[in-house]
Image (cartoon, rainbow, N blue to C red):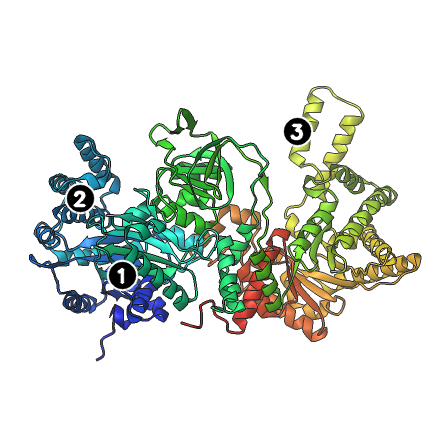
Amino acid sequence: MVTKQYVYAFEEGRADMKMMLGGKGANLAEMTVIGLPVPPGFTITTEVCRAYSVQKALPAGVTDQVAVALEALEAKVGKRFGDSESPLLVSVRSGAPISMPGMMDTILNLGLNDQTVEAHARNTNNERFAWDCYRRFIQMFSNVVLGVSLHNFERLLEQHKERLGIVLDTEFQPEHLKALVADYKALIRKLANRDFPQDPRDQLALAINAVFESWDNPRAIVYRRINKIADDLGTAVNVQSMAFGNMGNDSATGVVFTRNPNTGAKEFYGEYLPNAQGEDVVAGIRTPLPVTHLKEEMPDAYQQLFDLCELLEKHYGDMQDIEFTIERKKLYMLQCRAGKRTPAAAIKIAVDLAKDGKISREQAVLRIEPGQIDKLLHRGIDPTAKLDVLATGLAASPGAASGICVFDPEKAEKLVKEGQKVVLVRPETSPDDIHGIVVAQGILTSRGGMTSHAAIVSRGMGKPCVVGCESVRIDLERGFFMVGDRTVKEGDIISLDGGTGNVILGAVPLVDPELSPEFKELLTWADEIRTLGVRANADNPQDAGKAREFGAEGIGLCRTEHMFGQGGHHPERMAVAREMILAEHLDERRLALDKLLVMQRDDFYGMFKAMAPHPVTIRLLDPPLHEFLPGAEELAIEVAVMRATGKEGRELYQKEQLLRKVRALSEVNPMLGFRGCRLGMIFPEIYEMQLRGIFEAAAQLNKEGLRVEPEVMHPLVGHVNELKALRVMTDSIATQVMAEAGVTFKYLVGTMIEVPRAALTADEIAEYGEFFSFGTNDLTQTTYGYSRDDAEGKFLGQYVEKKVLPENPFVTIDRTGVGKLMAIGCDLGRKVRPDIKLGICGEHGGDPASIEFCHSLGLDYVSCSPYRVPVARIAAAQAAARAKGAQATSSSI
């Protein structure tokens, strides 16, 4: 019987084994195979994690395979695990198939105990170094495995520093560290109710289990949910012989990027700490030095590091994030992975790599997360504004934000739920702060560098971040920070400029961003690749103009109810709309409609002119009429107060009449009530007015020499006879207007597919409709039987969290339900009318996953909000590239 392999030595793996070995394990294997100086080790596969998550125990055979791999590792390095003369020390690290920086656990210096620490001191001839490794190991192991919170150890550390009168960790002498270790072990006995384990093999077994358990820790679960990473991927565990960056001033540890992760510029970028271990850099406890400083201190190691980084970028075809350690001037590469980067940097790097011939244009487009495009379009600080700059730190993640100063992540989360905007201020952040970082507008830390936790996570989320702002002195207990003699209390408003590192008192004015040449070039490549058209949803010429700036190829949805004043856009129009609704007789209603006709014609003229020669789809009035009137409860209170206070006459009569009308129009379920095309069927004069406005505007522009071909969309058709009657009305009005104007023009008549019956009878409806636009918001509501507002407010979030549903179906199209109806509608429509135009105009039109589904259905276009147009262009190109089999990774590996 063949035993399944669960453990792989680094030399047995490859870069394409990420799903099995995790990203870290696969890259360590790849670096080992191509001959880089990687400390040897082995990887326990993600399959073990998946099994462990279910049965809370390692599968049979894993422990034996770990023992064999450990024996081979001992042979490679010439040291033995737990040996009192030449002990082997290892690190134990997580490594998921998709990078989750800082979300799971790591343990360094494993194998130290009261005996091996003495051997370690003798072998290195450095007693201080050995005991520093031991105290670090006890602290990390006890936190990760035994559940003793780090702040307990930090408090002891600070107490020892105060008693000794020292500031830096590096000032501890061996006798100081021995006393600290003794206090650490006493603390563990008190809080963990056990002694610190002395057997290195027990330490390793416990550490491996703890790393697997960290896959399901709260911060990892939150990170996966935010980044849409599957819960069943699991993490691998990497066991690697230690390289020590804390052996003296000829040793160091750091993180470097082959390009600037903030700007994308081709420059060697990173930081390091002399005489330190890796967690010191990431934790932000000490402010590191720029990597260029290493060139002066250790020129040979610097040059080797630079050359190897260039090799790795060429090998992987992407910007690399590389962890390294220098032990007594000898360089070791501990990890490499595709580096986290800002949205602007991601675009520049992808375009530059394509221009250098390292990747194809399709690969460049696939490298961009569509959501990053959206973040690029957010505003920054107005350069003409006068700013009260309190302090300047390191500009870790660009963008600008204002909000209430908050020091606690839980409080940040609470205030955001109450509708406040917050800026999270911390000495440094840790993975445990992730929930506060997610909701904050921006992050400020007083410690840490450009590769600290706060910097990396903020860049990945596209949030402005300022780190290492050492002039900011934070008092967490009393809830304020000071800069010089100035005090900022919790609740005060501050602003951050993540591009300059400025911390500013008060709110700041913001301006629209300027798009880089690389951004525009990438969008041009996307347009060459995609087959799906991209339109915008816009209700006025200003939004239409913005949509064109962003590359929209037409308007896929113009909601005429907004032109009527719905939503408070135009109070004067709302008054006229109410006249129309409150009219008791047709003649009265026509007087109001005549006023609205002038307004509507001007609106349509502006829209057509702004978008010419691109198509404009105009949806006739859709919402229930009561939405243009005040609420019944509000009116009833007003009437009651007027009666109680003795008010009489015309004002009271008008309020009573309005209340009667509101009550008459009220419905038990207005979403399924008197709305959409039903309004046009019962009150044809309303739709006739709108149609006349559309066609008169089109006639005028055609006479002026602009080719305008309107697309008239009748909403909420559920039966063919509705569209049949409305088609007759539309054609009749168009014929009249063209005769009156002495001009002819083309136009299309279609409908929104918003109810299941329309999709199931699309062949009948296509007899009278030349285009379908899927209104996926209402189609989702009517398919699921959900009211969106109620569902999202009451249970939908929990459904997603509990995995009843994989996604919120109002955010991403439900392919197996709603999507199946869309596919049926497309197939039936094409059978009757092969040239039928098919599109989507709900909010799903800007969602990348939904856009990919629309591409698979062969739709002609998607339509989304103007600011989502660039996102849709990239997502449509990615869908086309994937359909052709393109991959985001370089083919030159």
**Relative depth, front residue between 489 and 676:** 489
Residue type at mark 1: give it.
Val
Residue 192 marker: 2
Q: Position of residue 110 (x, y in %)?
A: 18, 55
Viewer-nearest of discs 3 and 1 = 1
In the displayed structure image, the side of residue 525 where residue 100 appears, left or right: left
Tell me the residue at 25%/42% (across/down): 150
Q: Position of residue 352 (x, y in %)?
A: 51, 62
Task: Please rate how many residues cluster around mark 2, counting C-alpha atoms within 10 Å: few if below 14, some from 14 to 19, many from 20.
Answer: some
User: Where, quadrant-wise, is the N terminus in this rendering?
Assistant: bottom left
- Which residue is tagged 1? 237
User: Where, quadrant-wise, is the C terminus in this rendering?
Assistant: bottom left
Q: Closer to the N terminus: mark 2 or mark 1?
A: 2
Q: Position of residue 341 (x, y in %)?
A: 45, 54
- Which residue is tagged 3? 637
Tell me the residue at 59%/42% (across/down): 511
Whether the residues at callouts 2 and 3 have beta carbons within 8 Å, the answer is no
